[in-house]
Amino acid sequence: MATRLPPATAGSPVIVLPYHFASVTADATAAVKIKLPFEADIAGFSVAARASSGTSPTLDINLKAGVSSLLTAPVSVSTSTVTEAAIATKRVADETILTIDFDIGGTSTPTFLDVDILLTLVRI
């Protein structure tokens, strides 16, 4: 399902932040860490991967402000589709530190290849 921006954002700048990881093989706290230079609404957060290996590999990705998740639940990565997150907290304040965390599971060296994350913000 595509994220549609509400009409009130028609004149507001939309910022798209893509992140790419060639491979993910371990948990990572703050795999991405940014400090927002403005107040913003989170318009979308999606994840995808090209391939995975190992036995029953899983990869959950979470978007946080400080220690609090901004999502209703971490997003489970799929190698067959782009997965959109359900946003729990839309508004983030100026100077907020955002992090993206990885939680990988499975056995026999679980690996996800070409992991793409897309964070879409609307500047307030």
Image: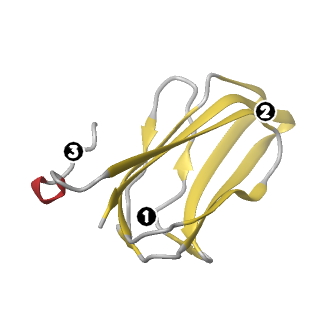
x, y percent for residue 87 = 38, 60
Q: Secondary structure at mark 2?
A: strand
In whole angstroms, how far apart are the C-alphas of marks 2 and 3? 32 Å
At label 1, counting other C-alpha atoms closer than 10 Å, the crowd grade (few under 14, some 14-19, many 20 or more) is: few
Question: For mark 2, what is the residue?
Answer: 111
Kind of residue indicated by mark 2:
Thr
Q: Is residue 113 left or right of residue 45?
A: right
Determine which residue is flagged by label 3. 4
C-alpha distance separating marks 2 and 1: 25 Å
The answer to whether residue 86 is left or right of residue 8 is right
- The one of 57 and 83 positioned closer to us in this rendering: 83
Residue 30 image label: none
- Residues 12 and 18: in front is 12
Q: CA distance from mark 1 to mark 3?
A: 19 Å
**Which residue corresponds to the image point at 21% horizontal and 44% vertical from the top-left?**
4
Compared with residue 54, is residue 26 higher up or lower down, i.e. above or below? below
Q: Position of residue 52 (x, y in %)?
A: 71, 26
Q: Are marks 1 and 3 in contact (CB under 8 Å)?
A: no
* Three-letter code for the amino acid on which mark 3 is drawn: Arg
> Closer to the N terminus: mark 2 or mark 3?
3
Which amino acid type corresponds to the residue marked 1 in the rendered image?
Answer: Thr
Question: How is this picture coloured?
Answer: secondary structure
> Residue 106, located in which quarter of the rendered image?
top right
Q: Secondary structure at mark 1?
A: loop
Q: Which residue is mark 1?
A: 72
Q: What residue occupies the far left of the structure in this picture?
A: 7
